[in-house]
């Protein structure tokens, strides 16, 4: 679990598409340097959010750590597009003593979004993005939470017809996350607020029924029962 408050920006120092070392596991691995600030209490197996993606530390030294990237991670996120020298947002998993300054972030990326525009507004930046899987737009609401590349941000606008939403970056945030280094057309990792997905998961069967079971939803059954009782009186 994370908060979406980026602790540090690290640097990609090595990418291996086939890492047969003991810490590589025979798959895609990535080594991230300039990370000494967040490795003081690191242990093998710890979770670290890299651009919003919860990854497991498989090897580390004083200033760098290595993570493995599963095929599903590469399909869902922008991590496969990274190159040596790119900056990445980093956050350690929360502890009981951490101030919860952002929102509940799992580190499980839903989809990516493409940056449509970046517009200065005083010392702030408006950023407009379009989800590459438009079905996730229903979980994005004005003034709600969203996590972009591991950064907890407030949604400003949502346009369902044109399939985009916008956020604003204040000056302080611009200097502590990677978003200002991106350009129009770049991809950003998205994790929508998980509370919306939980509510949908609970409410949808009540309204429409379970696809695996015959009959309508709980609300429909209540209405039918009421009408039956009404007709018998």
Image: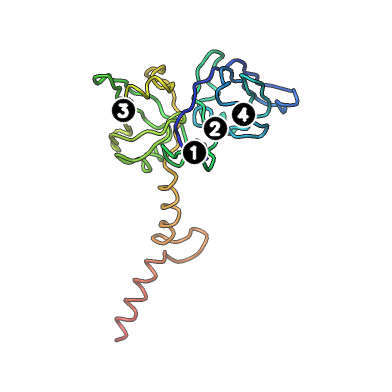
Task: Give how far across and how far down residue 84 sits, in percent.
Answer: 56, 14
Q: In 3D space, how far apart are the residues under numbered discs 1 and 3 (Cα atoms)?
A: 25 Å
Seen as rendered, the residue at the extreme bottom is 233
Which mark identifies residue 69? Answer: 4
Residue at image location 51% in from the left, 27% down from the top: 90
- Reading the image, the residue beneath label 2 is 92
Q: Dot 2 lies on which element?
A: strand
Left or right, 148 with respect to 41, comes to left
Q: Nearer the viewer, mark 4 or mark 3?
A: 3
**How many neighbours does mark 3 have within 10 angstroms: few (below 14), some (14-19), or many (20 or more)?**
many
Instruction: Indicate the quadrant where residue 231 lies.
Output: bottom left
Q: Nearer the viewer, mark 2 or mark 3?
A: 2
- Reading the image, the residue beneath label 3 is 168
Q: In 3D space, how far apart are the residues under numbered discs 4 and 3 (Cα atoms)?
A: 30 Å
Q: Earlier in the sequence, mark 2 or mark 4?
A: 4
Residue placed most toward the observer, 97 or 183: 97
């Amino acid at each position: 679990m994370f908060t979406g408050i980026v602790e540090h920006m690290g640097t990609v120092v090595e990418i291996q598409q086939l890492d047969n070392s003991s810490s590589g596991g025979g798959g895609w691995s990535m080594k991230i340097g300039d990370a000494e600030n967040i490795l003081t209490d690191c242990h093998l197996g710890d979770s670290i959010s890299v651009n919003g993606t919860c990854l497991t530390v498989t090897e580390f030294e004083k200033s760098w750590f290595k993570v493995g990237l599963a095929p599903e991670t590469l399909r869902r996120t922008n991590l496969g597009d990274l190159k040596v020298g790119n900056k990445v947002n980093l956050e350690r998993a929360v502890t009981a003593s951490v101030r919860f300054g952002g929102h509940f972030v799992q580190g499980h990326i839903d989809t990516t979004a493409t940056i449509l525009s970046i517009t200065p507004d005083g010392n702030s930046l408006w950023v407009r993005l379009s989800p590459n899987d438009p079905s996730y737009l229903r979980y994005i609401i004005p003034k709600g939470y969203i996590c972009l590349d591991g950064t907890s941000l407030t949604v400003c606008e949502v346009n369902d017809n044109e399939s985009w939403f916008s956020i604003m970056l204040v000056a302080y945030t611009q200097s502590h996350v990677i978003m200002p280094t991106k350009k129009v057309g770049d991809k950003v990792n998205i994790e929508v607020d998980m509370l919306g997905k939980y509510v949908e998961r609970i409410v949808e069967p009540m309204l429409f029924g379970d696809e695996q079971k015959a009959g309508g939803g709980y609300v429909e059954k209540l209405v039918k029962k009421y009408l039956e009782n009404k007709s018998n009186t």
